Image: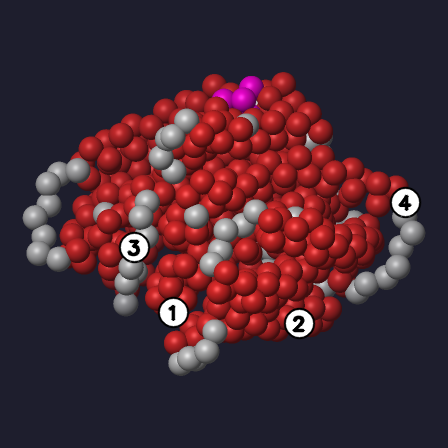
Amino acid sequence: MSNNKRIAKNTIFLYIRMLVLMLVSLYTSRVVLAALGVEDYGIYNVVGGIVVLFTFINNAMITSTQRYLNYELGRNDLQQAKKVFSVSLNIHIFIALIVLLLAETVGLWFLNTTIQYPESREFAVHVTYQLSILTTCVKIIRAPYNAAIIAHEKMSFYAYLSIFEAILQLGIVFMLMSYSADRLILYSILLCIVALIVNLCYYAYCRKKFEICHYALYKDKLLYRQLLSFSGWSLFGGVANMGASQGLNMLLNVFFGVTVNAAMGIATQVNTAVSSFVSSFQTAFNPQIVKSYAARDYGYFIKLILSTSKYSYLLLFIIALPIYICCPEVLNVWLTEVPDYAVSFCRLMLIFALLDALQGPLWYSVQATGKIKTYQILMSFMILANLPIAYVCLKLGYSPNSVLVVRCIINLATLFVRLWYLNRLYKFPVMEFVNGVIFRIVPITVIAYLISYIPIDADTSLLKILIVVAMTLVANMVLILSIGLNKDERLVVKRKINRLYEKYRRG
């Protein structure tokens, strides 16, 4: 199967996966918020966030594992890929133990001395915290198996298992609604059980399908050093990103309490749901980016980066624009009770997600080279700047919205710094990116946004949402075909449409 056909097939599987996950996520979030209430929902987000803070170690190692598996498979070196898997599994188990230690010491101290929650919920908070630790450790050990599936580009199984996990989470919702005792504790228990079941599925599939997933004890000190060195520098990015997300969530809790955390939880759910589509798209392309670099096919390598950046932004923009315009109506239809600041948080998160989608392939291209030390230091300091700047804004009396405004501005600044750095690293064609990506997506964004603000007189929120979705979809399709695609890309689309028409006509 050719690379393009494989990418197209994988993208379809991942899009089906994300569509199901998005629908389940939006529904379950609504029901969970209604079942737990704003207060308990806010508690779960902030308590779980403490544990997530310690997973920056694991996130760095995931990046390292995925990169080295992709690279070795790109070189067709199965023996070395097997070593990478076994060594990375050892490291992930060790990381799980470190997270457990940190969560039971520093995290527990922070929970008891800093986090605000009603005294009557103290027992539920501590039970939820312990279960969150266990769930997180289980997911950490899963990472090498997940990386192996993506490196082999077996996206069909990845999609099926994610859908199965979503179905289990849907089952949790129905159990939650029929339970009359402490629903926060039950919710935490059931999420932990689901994580364990999914881990077993990953293990069974990888053992059966992939030779490299047959664990063996290797004492290759050089490989340990390579993986840990790569992940060590990735720690800077992990710390920065955790600080910019969970750290800002903690700041909001300290200044405004758990009700604002509930609004941030809703915004994060919306952001996760829409960004999942782009994540799926990039997941299908990322292995090919690393493999093309490993095979020294630099022309294809650059082409993949440019096209993935542009398509990632445009695909997310098609989804994000109607949600941005109709955010009050969407939240009113979706939730039984809309927390304060939820609308403004959601809109700012969508802007942040669009900027992030554009930059994902740029970061992955650095991973492909393996030269990440200077890049990680530079990016991490910029992203970590979110915390002190946000703190100053809140201390000066600005609204909670200022936290996400700062985050969006810094994310825009990182785009220009990334382009400058990549040009120094491997002569990345910056002007080709500006002409082929930036100058195409900016006019589409501005024109589609202006068109979308045509006054709409609708009797219900749902009707307005449907009208705006239809209007923005048509506008975006026309603009993408006329401005977003170059001549060759339009020719490919035309051929696909003609082929589909011929099949339809022949019956």
- Left or right for 446, reference 59: left
Q: Residues within 10 Å of mark 1 (few under 14, many from 20)?
A: some
Q: Amino acid at mark 3?
A: Val
Residue under pointer 4: 221
Decide if residue 139 is in sight here: no
In this view, the residue in front, 496 or 193, is 193
In this view, the residue in front, 144 or 25, is 25
- Left or right for 220, reference 127: right
Dot 3 or dot 2, earlier in sequence: 2
Q: Is residue 132 magenta?
A: no
Residue under pointer 2: 200
Q: Alpha carbon of mark 3 to alpha carbon of mark 2: how far?
A: 37 Å
Q: Residue at the location (26% across, 54% down)? A: 330
Q: Residue at the location (39% across, 41% down)? A: 349
> Which circle marks residue 35 in the picture?
1
Q: Amino acid at mark 1?
A: Ala
Q: Position of residue 268 (x, y in %)?
A: 43, 49
The range drawn in magenta is 415-420
| Of labels 3 and 2, the one closer to you | 3
Q: Amino acid at mark 2?
A: Leu
